[in-house]
Image (cartoon, rainbow, N blue to C red):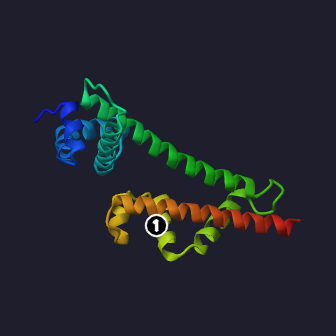
Amino acid sequence: MKTISLEQIRAELATGNNGCLKVIFDNYALYCVGLLIKKTGCSEEDAEDILMDAVLNFREKVMYGQIEYLTNLKAYLFSTCHRMWLARYNKEKMQRKQLNEVYDELYDNDMIISRKENHRKISFQALNRLGDKCKTLLTLFYIENKRMTEIAEIMGFTGADVAKTSKSRCFKKLLLEVDQLQKNIKDTLV
């Protein structure tokens, strides 16, 4: 394991040489990826993606002078990875919560058809309004519980990050469709 000081990293990055980032990634991948999987239960690919994001985040902070002193790069990288994983997890959890809240607001208890059936109908109507790509992607993720790497492979994306970005866009479209259906229902009730 090649050790590299903060001063060396700063000097290399200042000259435009990013080779030190590969050394950092290689030196700490086994530790950070393994511990992230152990602590969070995420996949190895997600852990590697998060580590790469953490290394790039570290690069930015070094280049902009936001890190002046660092005693343990390994601990710094892992804590950054863990915070990034929590942010992703909480974002996905919030998206699911928002969708559930939208469903909960759709109907009053007075409706003839049960609330659960209405939620299912609205969600499938909204899903069917989306294009085939979004419909397939959201079905794979939310209904079939496929991982991003599997979705990328099934749908022919270049990688899990592309699948994640597409899922996020499709989810936003789905929320807009649910909102539109909700407005239509409220208009017919008035």
Residue drawn at the location 22% of the way across and 48% of the way down? 16
Secondary structure at numbered mark 1: helix
Please say if 97 is above or below 120. above
Question: Picture coordinates of residue 57 (x, y %)?
Answer: 35, 42
**Residue closest to the eye, 174 or 8:** 8
Q: In what quadrant of the picture does the N terminus appear?
A: top left
- Dot 1, how many residues are within 10 Å of its Cα: few (below 14), some (14-19), or many (20+)? many
Q: Say what amino acid the circle numbered 1 marks.
A: Leu
The residue carrying mark 1 is 137
Query: In the picture provided, is 33 more to the left or to the right than 79?
Result: left
Residue drawn at the location 35% of the way across and 68% of the way down? 157
Q: In what quadrant of the picture does the C terminus appear?
A: bottom right
Residue 108: quarter of image: bottom right
Question: Picture coordinates of residue 61 (x, y %)?
Answer: 35, 38
Q: Give the residue at the far front of this rendering.
A: 15
Query: In the picture provided, is 25 more to the left or to the right than 142?
Result: left
Question: Picture coordinates of residue 113 (x, y %)?
Answer: 76, 63
Q: Is residue 23 visible?
A: yes
Q: Is residue 144 visible?
A: no
Q: Give the residue at the far right of this rendering.
A: 190
Residue drawn at the location 18% of the way across and 30% of the way down? 5
Residue 40: quarter of image: top left
**Residue closest to the eye, 110 or 86:** 86
Question: Picture coordinates of residue 90 (x, y %)?
Answer: 50, 43
